[in-house]
Image: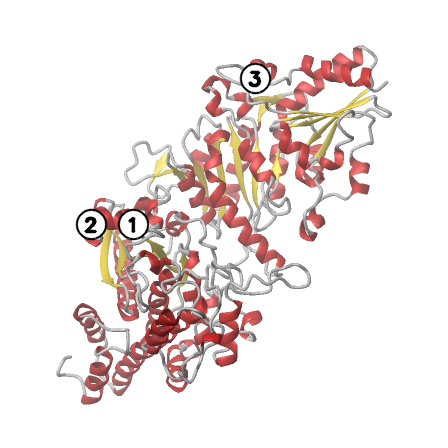
C-alpha cells in the first residue's frame, strides 16, 4: 500500500488484503485493487472518505460472497439454515438433495463481483447468465441483499425463517391447488429471479446474443461458461458485430472451471487458460485472466474492461482505429465447486457430497466443516449488506430493475398499407421486403436487425438489404455492405436468429430457408417460454414481436433435393402455445403483409411465417387480407350447403384446392374452399391463456360453415395438422388430411405436389371417393 495513504486507510486495506475465510486475494488481485485505489485523488477529506468507503465495499463483498456460498450449499443439502452458526442435525438435511452445486458456487463470487462493480461506480449495469442452471448463486445473493421482486421478498427474507424456506423451496417440485408450481425458485433462471432476462437453459445462446443487446449508454455483463463454449458456433464473432455507434458496452465473463458434467471441458483438455487466451486473441478479443474465486477481481476487472471498451469504441467512432476492436474478455479461472469438498472433480458439478446426508455420517460431517468455514454472523452480514446496498446514495436502481430487464416500451410509426389489386401474381417475400423497408424509413431512430443465414437477395429482400446493408468490418461493396449494417449475415442459423432475438430494444426480422430454420428452434423456444411466463405473471414483455419467415420452402425448393424439402419448422412451432408462438401460412402477398402489420403491433411473441418467395396469384383485397390476418381464416369460395369443403393450409395448397374445386364443380359437386392462415387459432386450447387466444366453438362455426365432408390439404405433414385441427375433424370417414408425405427429390412445383398427392387431380380423386362412400 502506498505510503501516501493515512494509517487508517492502510490498516483497512491490509485487513481486506488478508482475505476473509475462503475468500482469499492473490497478489495479482491485490495489485489490481491498489491500482484502482490510486486513481482516487487525495485532495480533500471527501477523497479520504471515498477511499475508506471503497475498502469498506470490498470487505462487505467478501462477507456477502462467503455467506452466499454458505447458503448455496444449504440450498442443495439442507431443509433449514442455522443463522447462529450452530450445527445441523441429521434430520435437518434433505433425504434426496438436488442442485447444480459446483457451478453455482463458482457463480457466487462472479455475481457478487458484478454487484460490487455497480456499488463502486455508482452505476447499475445489466447482466445475463448463460449457465442458467447456476441460478442458486443468484437466488442466494439476492435473498441476502434483499434484491427481490415483491412476490419473493415476503417469502425469502434474510433471516432464519426466510432462508430456510428458500432451501426447502429449492427443487421442492410441489404444485399448488391450481396445478401450478408452488415454488418461486426454479432449477434455472425464471421470471421470478430478480433481474433475470433469460432462462439460460439452452447452453451457448447467451454467448451469441450479448453483443447485440444493449443500446448506447447501457452496459451489460454476460456470464458464460467453458462448458457452454462447446455448444453453439459463433460466440467468437462478437467483435465482428459490436459497434459503438449502435451498441452499448459489453463485457463477457467466462467462468473457466474446467469441467462439464462428467469430464473435463474440451478447453481444459486443450490447455485451459493459456490455450483460451491464444484463441481469443486470434478472434479479436483482449483476454483478461483473473482469480475466479474473488469478487474483487471480478469487480475491478469489469470496471477496467468497460472503461477500455468505451475508449476504444470512441477511437473507432472517430476513425483512429478500425473495426473489429479488441473486445475485453474476462477469463475467471476457478476450481469447480470451490468452497465444498470434492472441488475440481466430476462430483462437484451436481452433488459433491452425494445425495443423502441424512444417512451418510461422513459426508454430513464434511458438509458441516466446510460450511463452518464460510459462515458469516448475522450482525456482520447485516452491516455488509447495508454497505453494499448504496443505491439511494448513488440514486441508482436496484439490480432487479436494470435496463434490459425493464425495457422501455417503443411505439412504431407504420407506413401506408397499399394493398395489391386482385388478379396479379406477386411474391409474398417481395411484398414483405417492400413494406419492411418502408417501416425502416418510418422509424429511423429504431435499431433494426435482419437475421440472414445467406441468400437475402435470392429471398427477395433486396430493398431491405439496400436500407440496412450487411454488417461487415471492411465493406467490399458500399451498396450492400456497411460497418454499421443492420443485416447480420452468417451461414449459421443459430447465430443470426440470436442476433435478432437479442435486439429486444429494436425491431427484428429473420428470413431463412425453411429446411434450415429448424436449427433456430432451440433459441426461439427458450425466449417464448420466458415471455409467456412473464405474461401469465401479469408482467408482460415489452419487446416488439419477432417474425421468423421460412421461405424457399418445401413446395418451391424441389430443385435442391429432399434435404431442402422439410416442413418440420412450422410443425414444431405449432406444438408451442399459439397465443405466444403463432404459426402463419399466408396465401398471397396481401395476407403476408397484413399478418406482418398485425404482428408488429403485438409484444413478446415469436411467430413462424411460411411464405412463398415465388409469385402467387393475389386472391384477397386489402380489406379481406386484414380480416383474414385478424381471424386466421379466409373463405376463398363460399358455397352454401356445400357437398364437400376443401380446407387449405399454405399458398400452393390453396391454389391446388381452387383448381380441384373447379374440377368438382364441373361435375355438379358443390364445393367450398377455405384457407386457414393460422391453424393454431382453431385448436383445442391446452390452458386458460391459450383459450383466451383460440377461437371457441361458436366462433369457429361462424367463420367456417359446417360441412358434411372435409378435406384438409396442408403445407405440413398430415399427422401434426390432424392433431391441431381436432375440432374441425368430422371423423375418419368424413375428413381426410392430405399433407407432405416425405416424398421429393429434384422436382418442380408440379412434381412436388404430385409425388405428395396434393395436385388438383389427387384432391378431386379423394373428394369423389369420399362422396361415393358417404352417399
Q: Quadrant of the C terminus?
A: top right
Residues at marks 2 and 3, CA–CA distance in whole angstroms: 52 Å
- Image height of 734 relative to 759, above or below: below
Tag 3 secondary structure: helix
Nearer the observer: mark 2 or 3; the answer is: 2
> Circle 1 is placed at which residue position?
265
- Give yes or no for contact between labels 3 and 1 (Cβ–Cβ under 8 Å): no
Q: Quadrant of residue 83?
A: bottom left
Q: Quadrant of residue 126?
A: bottom left
> Circle 3 is placed at which residue position?
752
Q: How far from the left and from the top, in percent, is residue 279? A: 22, 46
Identify the residue at image location x=20%, y=86%.
11
Q: Earlier in the sequence, mark 2 or mark 1?
A: 1
- Give yes or no for contact between labels 2 and 3 (Cβ–Cβ under 8 Å): no
- Image height of 651 relative to 208, above or below: above
Q: Label 1: how many residues lie within 10 Å, few (<14), some (14-19) or many (20+)?
A: many
Disc number for residue 271: 2
Q: How many marks?
A: 3
Is any part of residue 529 visible from this angle?
yes
Tag 2 secondary structure: loop
Is any part of residue 251 visible from this angle?
no
Side of 386 where 681 appears, left or right: right
Q: How far from the left and from the top, in percent, is residue 389? A: 41, 77
Tag 1 secondary structure: loop
Q: Nearer the viewer, residue 60 or 742?
A: 742
Q: Quadrant of the N terminus?
A: bottom left
Q: How far from the left and from the top, in percent, is residue 618? A: 65, 24
Amino acid at each position: 500500500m502506498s505510503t501516501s495513504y493515512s494509517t487508517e486507510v492502510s490498516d483497512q486495506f491490509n485487513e481486506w488484503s488478508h482475505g476473509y475465510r475462503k475468500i482469499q486475494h492473490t497478489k495479482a488481485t491485490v495489485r489490481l485493487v491498489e491500482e484502482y485505489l490510486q486513481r482516487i485523488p487525495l485532495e480533500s477529506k471527501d477523497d479520504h472518505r471515498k477511499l475508506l468507503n471503497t475498502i469498506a465495499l470490498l470487505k462487505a463483498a467478501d462477507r456477502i460472497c462467503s455467506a452466499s456460498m454458505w447458503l448455496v450449499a444449504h440450498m442443495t443439502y439442507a431443509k433449514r439454515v442455522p443463522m447462529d452458526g450452530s450445527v445441523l442435525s441429521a434430520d435437518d438435511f434433505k433425504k434426496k438433495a438436488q442442485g447444480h452445486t459446483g457451478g453455482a458456487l463458482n457463480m457466487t463470487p462472479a455475481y457478487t463481483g458484478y454487484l460490487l462493480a455497480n456499488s463502486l461506480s455508482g452505476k447499475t449495469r445489466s447482466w445475463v447468465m448463460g449457465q442458467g442452471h447456476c441460478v442458486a448463486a443468484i437466488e442466494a445473493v439476492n435473498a441476502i441483499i434483499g434484491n427481490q421482486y415483491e412476490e419473493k421478498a415476503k417469502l425469502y427474507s434474510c433471516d432464519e425463517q426466510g432462508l430456510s424456506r428458500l432451501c426447502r423451496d429449492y427443487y421442492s417440485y410441489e404444485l399448488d391447488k391450481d396445478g401450478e408450481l408452488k415454488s418461486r425458485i426454479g432449477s434455472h433462471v425464471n421470471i421470478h429471479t430478480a433481474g433475470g432476462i433469460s432462462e439460460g437453459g439452452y447452453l451457448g445462446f447467451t454467448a451469441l446474443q450479448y453483443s447485440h443487446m444493449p443500446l448506447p449508454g447501457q452496459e451489460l455483463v454476460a456470464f458464460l461458461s467453458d462448458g457452454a463454449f462447446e455448444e453453439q458456433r459463433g460466440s467468437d464473432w462478437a467483435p465482428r458485430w459490436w459497434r459503438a455507434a449502435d451498441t452499448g458496452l459489453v463485457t463477457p465473463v467466462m467462468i473457466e472451471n474446467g469441467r462439464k458434467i462428467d469430464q473435463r471441458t474440451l478447453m481444459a483438455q486443450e490447455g485451459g487458460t493459456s490455450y483460451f487466451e491464444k484463441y481469443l486473441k486470434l478472434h479479436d478479443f483482449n483476454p483478461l485472466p483473473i482469480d475466479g474465486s474473488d469478487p474483487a477481481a471480478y469487480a475491478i476487472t469489469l470496471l477496467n474492461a468497460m472503461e477500455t471498451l468505451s475508449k476504444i469504441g470512441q477511437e473507432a467512432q472517430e476513425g483512429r482505429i478500425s473495426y473489429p476492436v479488441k473486445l475485453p474478455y474476462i477469463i475467471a479461472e476457478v476450481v469447480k465447486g470451490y468452497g465444498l469438498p470434492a472441488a475440481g472433480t466430476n462430483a462437484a458439478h451436481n452433488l459433491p457430497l452425494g445425495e443423502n446426508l441424512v444417512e451418510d455420517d461422513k459426508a454430513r460431517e464434511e458438509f458441516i466443516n466446510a460450511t463452518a468455514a464460510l459462515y458469516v454472523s448475522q450482525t456482520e452480514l447485516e452491516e455488509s449488506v447495508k454497505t453494499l446496498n448504496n443505491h439511494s446514495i448513488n440514486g441508482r436502481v436496484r439490480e432487479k430493475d436494470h435496463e434490459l430487464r425493464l425495457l422501455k416500451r417503443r411505439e412504431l410509426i407504420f407506413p401506408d398499407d397499399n394493398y395489391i389489386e386482385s388478379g396479379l401474381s406477386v411474391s409474398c417475400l417481395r411484398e414483405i421486403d417492400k413494406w419492411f423497408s418502408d417501416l425502416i424509413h418510418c422509424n429511423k431512430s429504431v435499431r433494426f436487425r435482419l437475421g440472414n443465414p445467406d441468400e437475402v437477395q435470392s429471398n427477395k429482400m433486396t430493398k431491405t438489404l439496400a436500407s440496412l446493408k450487411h454488417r461487415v468490418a471492411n465493406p467490399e461493396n458500399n451498396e450492400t455492405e456497411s460497418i454499421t449494417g443492420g443485416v447480420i449475415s452468417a451461414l449459421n442459423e443459430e447465430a443470426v436468429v440470436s442476433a435478432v432475438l437479442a435486439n429486444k430494444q429494436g425491431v427484428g426480422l429473420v428470413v431463412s430457408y425453411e429446411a434450415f430454420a429448424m436449427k433456430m428452434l432451440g433459441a426461439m423456444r427458450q425466449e417464448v417460454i420466458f415471455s409467456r411466463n412473464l405474461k401469465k405473471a401479469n408482467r408482460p414483455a415489452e419487446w416488439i414481436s419477432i417474425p421468423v419467415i421460412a421461405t424457399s420452402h418445401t413446395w418451391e425448393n424441389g430443385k435442391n433435393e429432399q434435404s431442402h424439402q422439410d416442413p418440420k419448422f412450422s410443425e414444431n412451432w405449432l406444438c408451442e402455445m399459439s397465443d405466444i408462438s403463432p404459426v402463419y401460412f399466408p396465401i398471397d402477398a396481401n395476407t403476408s403483409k397484413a399478418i406482418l402489420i398485425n404482428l408488429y403491433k403485438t409484444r413478446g411473441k415469436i411467430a413462424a411465417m411460411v411464405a412463398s418467395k415465388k409469385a402467387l396469384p393475389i386472391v384477397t383485397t386489402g380489406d379481406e387480407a386484414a380480416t383474414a390476418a385478424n381471424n386466421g381464416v379466409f373463405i376463398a369460395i363460399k358455397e352454401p350447403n356445400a357437398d364437400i369443403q376443401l380446407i387449405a393450409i399454405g399458398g400452393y395448397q390453396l391454389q391446388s384446392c381452387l383448381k380441384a374445386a373447379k374440377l368438382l364443380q364441373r361435375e355438379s359437386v358443390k364445393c367450398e374452399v377455405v384457407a386457414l392462415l393460422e391453424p393454431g387459432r382453431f385448436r383445442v386450447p391446452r390452458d386458460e391463456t391459450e383459450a383466451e387466444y383460440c377461437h371457441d366453438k361458436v366462433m369457429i362455426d361462424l367463420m367456417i360453415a359446417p360441412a358434411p365432408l372435409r378435406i384438409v390439404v396442408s403445407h405440413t405433414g398430415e399427422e401434426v395438422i390432424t392433431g391441431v385441427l381436432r375440432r374441425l375433424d368430422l371423423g375418419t370417414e368424413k375428413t381426410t388430411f392430405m399433407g407432405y408425405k416425405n416424398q421429393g427429390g429434384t422436382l418442380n412445383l408440379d412434381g412436388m405436389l404430385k409425388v405428395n398427392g396434393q395436385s388438383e387431380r389427387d384432391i378431386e380423386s379423394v373428394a369423389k371417393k369420399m362422396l361415393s362412400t358417404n352417399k
